[in-house]
Structures are given as structure tokens and as C-alpha cells.
Amino acid sequence: MQRIINYLFPPKMPISEEKKQEIDNHIKNDHVFVASKTYCPYCHKAKAILAKYNTKANIIELDEVAEGSAIQDYLLDVTGQRTVPNIFINGEHIGGASDLETLDREGKLKDLLDGKK
């Protein structure tokens, strides 16, 4: 039973203060920051949408970095969202792929990427 509980609600991974500061700096200072996973189809969709606008995004592939699970847990604390992609534009949490897709479909994404509200 504990295995099922751990699968559904995995224990949080510890994250270093330095890594927290690094992630906070990415959120605050990067025009576009995306926490992603290489195998995630929703991440592929989000990256394709951003690519349409030739957007230079800072993308961290959580499955390729040492503290990936800890970063994902930290972003849950910061945003309330555990899933990837976890997208920030101009320091603002956008959400995931479906949120980005909605902004694109409504014609609001280009303005956000251009720094307009």
C-alpha cells in the first residue's frame, strides 16, 4: 500500500538553496523560462508553439539535470503546478501547454512575448 501512496504522492525531494536561487533568477530574469521533460508530448507542443514566434526560451529539461525532481517539487511550491511544461513569460507564471495554446489561439501570446500586456 505504501508503494501506491508513494507513487501517487511522491515524497518531496530536497533542493539546495543555491538551486532555488537559480530557478528564482530564471523566473525573474529570463524572457521565457520553461521547465520541461524531453519525453513529454505536452512539452513538445509548448516548445513548438514558442518556436513559431522564434522565441529564445531558457528550457530546463528536468529529466536531464541532477536536481530535476527537486526543481519540479520547488516549482510546485512556487506555482501550485507539478506538471510540465511549467512556463513563465516575463516573470509571470503562464501555466502549461494548454494555457500557452489558449493564449496563442486567442492572439494574446504574441503580445506577451513582445512585452505587451
Image (cartoon, rainbow, N blue to C red):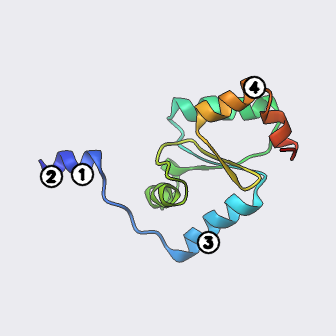
Q: Can residue 48 be seen in this view?
A: no
Looking at marks 4 and 1 on the same chain, the residue that comes earlier in the sequence is marked by 1
Q: How far apart are marks 4 and 2 (CA)?
A: 44 Å
Residue toward you, 7 or 93: 93
Mark 1: which secondary structure? helix
Other residues around mark 1 within 10 Å, as few (<14) / some (14–19) / many (≥20): few
Q: Residue 106 bears which disc, if any?
A: 4
Secondary structure of residue under mark 3 = helix
Residue drawn at the location 54% of the way across and 60% of the way down:
78
CA–CA distance between discs 3 and 2? Answer: 33 Å
Disc nearest the viewer among 4 and 3: 4
> Distance between the Cα atoms at labels 4 and 1?
39 Å
Label 1 to label 3, Cα distance in Å? 28 Å
Q: Which residue is drawn at 51% across and 34% down?
A: 40
Between the residue at mark 4 and the residue at mark 3, the CA separation in whole angstroms equals 34 Å
Where's residue 38, x and y in %?
A: 54, 39
- In the picture, the disc for residue 6 is 1
**Which residue is label 3 attached to?**
21
Residue 85 screen position, x and y as percent: 57, 41
- Side of 12 relative to 66 (left or right): left
SS under mark 2? helix
State the residue position of label 2: 2
